[in-house]
Image (spheres, rainbow, N blue to C red):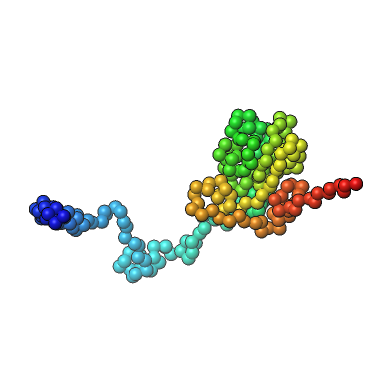
Amino acid sequence: MNSILFSSRRVLAPAWPMLFSACRHQVSVKRSVMSALSNVPTAYRKAKRVGRGPSSGKGKTSGRGMNGQKQKESVHPWFEGGQTPLHKTLPKIGFTNNFAQDLVKLNLGRLQEWIDKGRIDPSKPVTMKHLLDSRACRGIKDGVKLLADGKENFKTPLNITVSRASKEAIKCIEELGGTVTTKYYNRLALRALLRPQYFSTLPLESRPIRRRDIEYYKNSEVRGYLSKPEPRTEKANA
């Protein structure tokens, strides 16, 4: 072992001066480059110093002139010279609902078409992730709403979970032996459902906070996941 180390040192010993000289050369090159750096004249502009006396060129009125509206204060860009501005002339039409949800609409006709093409497996529970991966729905932001358009062509029982669903769509699926569940997802929980690969640890499921959301998902008519199951009435044995 000692002979091997000795031989390796004898082989590597002549190379050390070359390595040090190469390092010194690189450092000297970097220093020469750094010392030669200078500002580009067109890359910067000197600040305009105003109010520094007559000899500065911008003294007294600081380049604003003697009179005029701009001499005392600035003018906002939508000022129209004193006449009634356009945003006050035109009437207000409509409003923006800050509580509206951007739900993607999914009709039963499109769902049946995707099942016929084999892009959705009806034998397994269908979630909004399956709808996104199969491209049945695109750009899901706040959830998916199931609608009954094309219900005359729908003929496949399945178990599906969406954000909201119409009563006609629920009735059509349940008549075929399937189930519909409406479940609440906030933005974080929905992103974790649709793209779990972006999370090292999946967040816990959130519950609705707003009163209207709580009332909706507690409603058994829309098959809310917070609704209590109806008690089963069993006939007494005679």
Asked whether residue 126 appears in the rendered view, the answer is: yes
Q: Residue furthest right?
A: 238
Measuring 12% from the left and 54% from the top, which residue is drawn there?
3
Q: Quadrant of the N terminus?
A: bottom left
Q: Is residue 80 left or right of residue 98?
A: left
Q: What percent of the width, then of the height, locates residue 194?
A: 56, 46
Up the image or down, 149 lies above or below 86; here it is above
Question: Total of numbered circles in the picture?
Answer: 0
- Give 80 or 163, whichever is nearer the viewer: 163
Q: Is residue 194 left or right of residue 153?
A: left
- The answer to which quarter of the image holds residue 104 is top right
Q: Is residue 186 left or right of residue 58?
A: right
Measuring 66% from the left and 53% from the top, which residue is drawn there?
99
Q: Residue furthest bottom?
A: 53
- The answer to which quarter of the image holds residue 176 is top right
- Give 56 or 174, whichever is nearer the viewer: 174
Measuring 59% from the left and 33% from the top, which residue is drawn there?
119
Q: Is residue 41 left or right of residue 221?
A: left
Q: What percent of the width, then of the height, locates residue 170?
A: 73, 41
Asked whether residue 9 appears in the rendered view, the answer is: no
Measuring 71% from the left and 50% from the top, which residue is drawn there?
224
Q: What percent of the width, then of the height, locates residue 71?
A: 46, 64
